[in-house]
Image: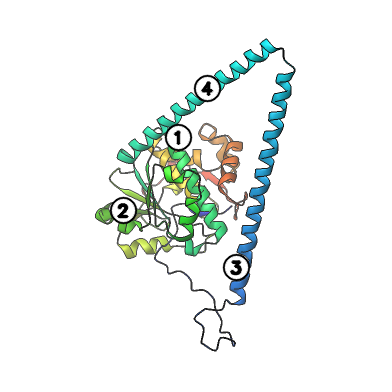
Amino acid sequence: MTEVDANGNGDAEVPPPKPETQESPQNNGNSSEPVLSKNALKKQARHQRWEAKKAEKKAAAKEKKKKESERKRKEWEESLASMPEDERTKFIESRISLRKERMEQHTLEKNSKKERLIKGKEEGQNVVIDLQFSHLMTPSEIHSLVKQIMYCYAVNGRCESPAHLWLTGCEGEMDDQLKKISGFDKWIIEKENKPYIEALQDRKDDLVYLTADSETVLEELDLKKIYIIGGLVDRNRWKGITMEKAQEQGIQTAKLPISNFLKMCSSQVLTVNQVVEILLKFIETRDWKTSFFEVIPQRKRSQADLEGNADNTVVEEEEEEEELEQTDDPLPSKKQCVEEIPSNKLVDGV
C-alpha cells in the first residue's frame, strides 16, 4: 500500500531532480538536446509499459461493461416477450415509476450535498492538501495520490458538517491527472495552481502544517486556523521535509495526538485520505479517540485493541474495499500493529 506520513510529509521547496544525461560523442557539443542516461531510459521505458498496461486494463473493463449491458438487455427483452400483453404493460409502467423515484431521490441527495459543501466552503474548517510534490513521485505514486484526493472529496461530501478543502500547487503532472477525473471541474473545492504560501499569504499567521516531526500536539481544531497536509506518496523517501519546509517558511506546525491513544509498532503512517477523514470525524465528534478508531483500519490493530474497542470500529470488509480503491497495492509496505494506551497512562501534551 502506498503510504504517506500520517500528518503530511512532503516539501514543495525541494527542487526537482535534474534529468540524468550523458555526453554523446556524436553531438560534439553542437546539439542542445540532452542525451538520456541508461538509467533514465530504463525509467522512461518502465513508465511507457505502465501507461500501456493501464490502457489495456481500461479497454478490458470497457469491453466487459459492454458485454454485461448487452446480457442484461437480452434478458430484459426475453422476460418481456414471455409476458402477456396486459401484464407486460403494467410491468413496464412500474419500472418507469421506480426509475423516476430513484432519479428524484438522487437529485435530492445531490442538491443536499451541494448545499452542505457550499456551506462548508463558507463556514467550514479550512484543510489544505499541498500538491507541490509531483516532481518527487513516480507516475504510479501520483496516480495513487489522485485516488486518495477523490476519496477525500467523496467523504467530505457525505459529512453533515464538511470542511473547506483546498488543493494548492496543482501544476504539471499532478494537475494533468486531476483534470482527467470525470466532473473535477464541478467540484466544490478550492483549486489553486499557486503554492499555499502565496494563495494564502494574507493569512500566514493562521497556517499550521501537520507533521509528525512537530513538538506541538494538536489538541483541538480552531476554525480560524488553516491546516495543511502534505500530499506526498513517498514510501518514506522524504522523511522530515515538511517540518523543514514549515520552519523555512516561518509557519506553525502540529502533529495529531495519535500517540495519546494508540501504540503503533512501527512509524505512524497513514494515507492522505485517512488524515483528512480523521479531521472530518473529529469535527463531527470532537473526540480524537473515536476519530482514530473509526478511521484507522482494523488490520493495523492488535487483537487486544479490537476486543477492547468493539463499539468504536467499523466493518472490516467495508474498510478493505475503500482502501483498495485508493491504493495500487492492497498490502502495506510495513506491517503495523496498534494497541490502545490505557487512559491512566495518558500524558497531557505528549
Q: Residues within 10 Å of mark 1 (few under 14, many from 20)?
A: some
Residue tagged 3: 44
Q: In this view, does 130 lie above or below 63?
A: below
Asked whether the residues under the numbered discs 2 and 1 touch, taking CB atoms below 8 Å apart as contact, a structural biologist would say no
Residue 207: numbered disc = 2
4 or 1: mark nearer the eye: 4
Sequence order check, earlier mark of 4 and 2? 4
Amino acid beneath label 2: Leu
Q: In this view, does 245 lie above or below 35?
A: above
Sequence order check, earlier mark of 3 and 1? 3
4 or 2: mark nearer the eye: 4
Asked whether the residues under the numbered discs 4 and 2 touch, taking CB atoms below 8 Å apart as contact, a structural biologist would say no
Q: Nearer the viewer, residue 216 or 294?
A: 294
Q: How far apart are marks 4 and 3 (CA)?
A: 50 Å
Asked whether the residues under the numbered discs 4 and 1 touch, taking CB atoms below 8 Å apart as contact, a structural biologist would say no
Residue tagged 4: 100
Sequence order check, earlier mark of 4 and 1? 4
Q: Nearer the viewer, residue 302 or 48?
A: 48
Residue tagged 1: 158
4 or 3: mark nearer the eye: 4
